[in-house]
Amino acid sequence: MKKMTSAIALLSALLLAPLGSAPAQAQKKITFGHQQVFDLAPVLLAQDKGFFAKHGIEVALKPIPLNSQNPAALEAGEVDIAMPTASVLLQAVNGGLDLVAVAGFSETVKTDSNFGIVVRPESNIKTPADFVGKKVGVPGLNAFLHVMFREWLTMKGVDWKKVQFVETVFPQMEGILKAGSVDAVVAIQPFMARIVGSKTGELMAHFIRDMPAGMSITVFASKKAWADKNQDVIKAFRAGFDEGAAYAHAHPDEARATVAKFLKLPPPAVAAVSIPQFGSKLTENSLAPWVSIMKSQGMIRGNVDLKSVIVP
């Protein structure tokens, strides 16, 4: 009787084993294109803590050097989801690319300390008007920081068309500033703190503080055809990201350490980084200010149907 009972138990275990391993086998794999920035914290934590896995997805990370290259990477099928800034996405959509925003990512806040304009001491830039005739490095032409800095100059009564902008990636900003290739850079933490700490540059202003709060900075985007076929994956990605964001806010020191390790930076380099306003929720109101700003800068023509841009 005992032998029969053991045989039945063994048979049951063998039958149930495939069922127990099914969720891991059924995980949907997606490729996520990213820039080397601190904002990756929720994504990295969602990976490390198993939040994505819990929702049935496996996320492979693929670096994309410049934000302005996100639409091309999506169109080429190199990645399933990318992280363009709102301005890059809207310009791409207005230009005819069939891209959509599948989730929110980060938004502007009035207390921002993660973005700033850093000037070379020898450039003699003391006021916004001093940028006229100068060369400024930005992390992507027509990306978030480029557009916002031009808007800031306009607000200060400066014609941004009289400023020369050069595209450069964040890790190279300190080098080109030190070499005198540019007079200033529009930087982000932790790179900004490193530039200021080495005395290569001086922080002139946290110019994002002058912008409206609640504007989308970065969004998650995909091709519309992909989004239409992967609604369940999008919901899972949002859920995993939001859990990663909540964890980052609850454990800021661990979030900083996780990003520092991924970016191969010493922990002190990210100590000054404030945890951004993260969240997957995206509304027309958070994108609307971009449309008017971009129209004023000649970046888009006609109207943009924001409702059709955002995946419910």
Image (cartoon, rainbow, N blue to C red):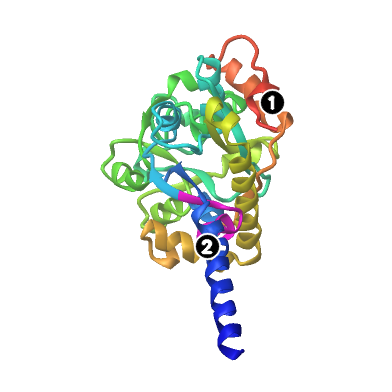
Q: Is residue 85 left or right of residue 307?
A: left
Q: Residues within 10 Å of mark 1 (few under 14, many from 20)?
A: some
Query: Residue sitting at 70 percent across and 23 percent down?
Result: 307
Report whether residue 152 is seen.
no
The residue indicated by pointer 1 is 288
Q: Is residue 226 left or right of residue 171?
A: right
Give residue 30's position: percent from left, percent from top: 48, 44
Give residue 73's position: percent from left, percent from top: 40, 31
Query: Among all residues in the image, which is located at the extreme front?
Result: 1
Query: Residue sitting at 56 percent across and 26 percent down?
Result: 224
Quarter of the rendering containing residue 10: bottom right
Residue nearest the viewer, comparing 307 with 9: 9
Relative to 221, residue 7 above or below: below
Give residue 288's position: percent from left, percent from top: 69, 25
Which disc is residue 18 wearing?
2
Report whether residue 210 is seen.
yes
Question: Nearer the observer, disc 1 or disc 2?
Answer: 2
**Do residues under tags 1 and 2 come within 8 Å of each other at their CB atoms?**
no
Q: Is residue 79 left or right of residue 96?
A: left
Q: Amino acid at mark 1?
A: Ala
Q: Amino acid at mark 2?
A: Pro
Magenta region: 46-59
Residue nearest the viewer, comparing 282 with 158: 282
